[in-house]
Image (cartoon, rainbow, N blue to C red):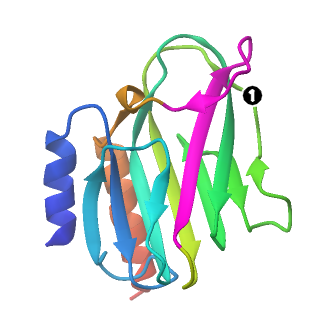
């Protein structure tokens, strides 16, 4: 039922927010315990108890050019940030230091791209994720503006989510 409500809310949502689904476990397993649309996206905050989360929507670049990203992760075990399946930032995985993995990102056409964050954390303090961007020619990183984000998910991304949920429930 929660997944249906999120899908309806996502379809009706206009610009300015991201879908957030919180799971009361560390593996994104089962249905989310809470789902909502977050409109204040400058720094996403997660509660102090153990959880995993999926933050999803679309990102629309305002103009062509080459963009760079900077991610700030606090009090998390593992986190990933992707645009259209392209891993931008990670923390706690691959035995490397946190931060950007593959920058810069050239944008050759203005369109909306799938935007996704996965978060995994133990109990303790509240955790935060902040994603900032800047054009390569203007390297002053700023929070991705809410106006560039939408909670709307394309049909392809909705189908991808359904496949991933089914796979997490096991084979057969």
Nearer to us in this view, 32 or 158: 32
Against 136, is 24 above or below?
Answer: below
Against 169, is 59 above or below?
Answer: above
Quadrant location of the N terminus?
Answer: bottom left
Q: Position of residue 166 (x, y in %)?
A: 36, 75
Residue at 45% x, 85% y: name it.
Answer: 25
Quadrant location of the C terminus?
Answer: bottom left
Q: Tell whether 32 sits left or right of 45.
A: left
Residue at 57% x, 83% y: name it.
Answer: 124
Residue at 56% x, 76% y: name it.
Answer: 125
How many badges with numbers are in the image? 1
The part of the image, by quadrant, that contains residue 127 is bottom right
Against 29, is 110 above or below?
Answer: above
Nearer to us in this view, 40 or 32: 40
Any magenta on residue 140? yes
Against 132, is 107 above or below?
Answer: above
Residue at 52% x, 14% y: name it.
Answer: 109
Query: Most extreme residue toward the front, as rendered?
Result: 125
Q: Position of residue 22 (x, y in %)?
A: 37, 71
Which stretch is magenta? 126-144
Within-10-Å neighbours for mark 1: few <14, some 14–19, many 20+: some
Q: Position of residue 139 (x, y in %)?
A: 74, 20
Q: Secondary structure at mark 1?
A: loop
Query: Most extreme residue toward the right, as rendered?
Result: 96
Q: Tell whether 63 sits left or right of 153.
A: right
Circle 1 residue? 104
Q: Position of residue 47 (x, y in %)?
A: 43, 73
The part of the image, by quadrant, that contains residue 15 is top left
Q: Tell whether 20 sits left or right of 77.
A: left
Any magenta on residue 29? no
């Amino acid at each position: 039922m929660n997944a249906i409500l999120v899908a309806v809310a996502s379809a009706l949502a206009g610009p300015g927010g991201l879908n957030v689904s919180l799971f009361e476990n560390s593996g994104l397993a089962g249905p989310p315990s809470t789902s909502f649309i977050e409109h204040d996206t400058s720094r996403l905050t997660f509660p102090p108890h153990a959880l995993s989360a999926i933050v999803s929507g679309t990102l629309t670049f305002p103009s062509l050019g080459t963009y760079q990203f900077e991610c700030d992760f606090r009090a998390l075990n593992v986190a990933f940030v992707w645009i259209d399946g392209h891993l931008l930032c990670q923390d706690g995985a691959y035995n490397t230091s946190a931060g950007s993995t593959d920058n810069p990102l050239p944008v050759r056409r203005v369109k909306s791209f799938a935007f996704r964050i996965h978060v995994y954390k133990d109990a303790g303090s509240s955790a935060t994720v902040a994603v900032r961007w800047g054009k390569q020619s203007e390297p002053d990183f700023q929070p991705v503006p809410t106006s560039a984000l939408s909670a709307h998910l394309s049909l392809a991304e909705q189908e991808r989510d359904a496949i991933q949920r089914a796979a997490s429930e096991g084979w057969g």
